[in-house]
Amino acid sequence: MTNTNLMKREYQICTRCIMDTSDPEIEFNSQGVCNHCLSYDDTAKKVLLTDEEKKPQLTKIVAEIKEAGKNKEYDCIIGLSGGVDSSYLAYCVKDLGLRPLAVHLDNGWNSELAVKNIENIVKILDIDLYTYVIDWEEFKDLQIAFLKASVVDIEMLTDSAIIVAIDRIAKEKNISYFLSGSNFATENIMPQSWFYSIKHDSLNIRAISKRFGSVGKLKSYPMFNFFEFWRYTYFNKVKTIPLLNFLPYNKSEAMQFLIEKLNWRDYGGKHWESKFTQFYQVYILPRKFGIDKRRAHLSSLIVSGQLPREQGLKLISENIYNERLLQEDKEYLLKKFELSESEFDRLMQADPLPHDFYPSYVSYIKILRKFKRLLTRKKAHV
C-alpha cells in the first residue's frame, strides 16, 4: 500500500534538489523550487559559518567544556553507533583534546559491521565505552506494537531510548555536555510527516504499548516519567552541542578518512548500522508509507553543495535494495519478531495513522505554547 496523499496531487519534483510530492506537505515557488530548499537558505544564513567564523566559536566551546569537566572523569558524552557522523565526531572530539565517554545503545539489531566499527574506534582512539543494553523481549514487543499501531516512526523507540540513556548516564557521571553528531550540512532536509518530532514522547510509547503490546508494564526499557519529560524538554541542564556544525564536515571526505585512519567500513546506507533500520528504510517506509528517505538524505547533500543534483537523480533512480537480499532480510526480521509472513503482510496493508491518534504529549505542548503566547501578548500590552 502507498500513501494515499500521493494520489491527491499532480507529481512534481523540485528543480533544485530532488524532493518531490512523496512529501504530501511540499510546496513549490514559481521557479519550481521547494520549501525545503528555501528553508535551507534561510537557516543556512544563521547556522552555516565560514571556516574563519568557526575557529573562534569552536575554541570557545572546547574551553567551556574543559572548564566544566575539571576534576571529573569525563568532560563530555557522545553517542556512538558505528555510523559515519558519530564515528567522525568521536575522532574530532579526541583530536580537540576532550575526554569523552562514548555511549552505545544495544537494542538487539546491531549489524556485525557496526559492532566492528565501534570496537576499532574506541580501541584506536582510546575512548571509554558504555554499552546500554535493552531487554530484547520488551523491545521486540514494543516494535511489534508500533507495527500494529500503524504509525510511521518505529525508529522513535530507539531514538527515545538513546535520549533517556544518555540523559541518565550524564547525570550519573556528572557530565555537563552532550556532543551530538547531528549536523546541518548533511541533515537539513526531512519532511515533518516522515517522522515523529517528539522523539522522547513516553506517553505515546506507553499508550501504544498498552494497547498493542503483550508484555504488560514496561520494566527495563528506558523511558521518561511525566516530570522527567518536562524537565528534559524545557529545563535540561545537560547542554547539547552539534559539534560538527563548528567543524569542516564533508560526508564523503569523512568516510574516506575513517576508512584510512580508523579501519572503518561502509555499511551501504544512512543508519544501516542497524539491521532493523535498514529494513525499515528499504521495505516498510516505501511499501507502507510511500516514503523513500534517500530522497531527503540526498537532497540535504545537494543543497549543501556536497552532491551534484544529476548524481542525486541517478542514485534515486536505482533500486533501493537487491530483491533477493531484501527477501532474506524480511525472513530474518520475521524470525526475530516471531511473526508469520501473513501476519506481517496484514500489518503492512493497514492504513497509516498519525502518532497523536494515540495519547501523546502533543496536546499538552500545544496548550503550553498557547499559554506562553498569551503571556507574551499580555506583557506587551502592559
Image (tube, rainbow, N blue to C red):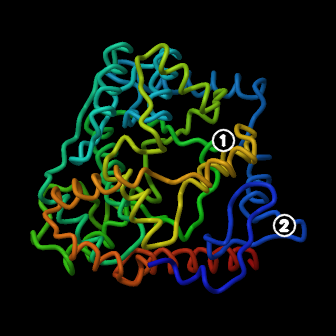
Q: Determine the residue positioned at 63% across, 55% down.
A: 189
User: Which quadrant of the figure has residue 338?
Assistant: bottom left
Q: Determine the residue positioned at 72% across, 46% down.
A: 302
Q: Name the side, left or right, on which 19 lies relative to 237.
A: right
Q: Secondary structure at mark 1?
A: loop
Q: Residue furthest bottom?
A: 8
Classify 54 as above or below 39. Answer: above
Q: Name the side, left or right, on which 33 lies relative to 122.
A: right
Classify 225 as above or below 315. Answer: below
Measure the alpha-carbon separation of dots 1 and 2: 22 Å
Q: Position of residue 253 (x, y in %)?
A: 61, 25
Q: Determine the residue positioned at 11% across, 58% down.
A: 137
Mark 1 or 2: in front is 2
Task: Please name the residue that numbered disc 2 is placed on.
Answer: 32
Q: Quadrant of the C terminus?
A: bottom right
Q: Nearer the viewer, residue 204 or 273?
A: 273
Q: Quadrant of the N terminus?
A: bottom left
Q: Name the side, left or right, on which 296 lies relative to 44.
A: left
* Type of amino acid at the residue the image marks with label 1: Ala
Q: Name the side, left or right, on which 300 lies relative to 323.
A: right
Q: Secondary structure at mark 2?
A: loop
Classify 72 as above or below 80. Answer: above
Q: Position of residue 311 (x, y in %)?
A: 70, 44
Local packing at callout 2 (Cα closer than 10 Å; few below 14, some 14-19, many 20+) is few
Question: Of the residues under marks 1 and 2, which one precedes in the sequence?
Answer: 2
Residue 185: numbered disc: 1
Q: Position of residue 136 (x, y in %)?
A: 14, 53
Residue 328: numbered disc: none
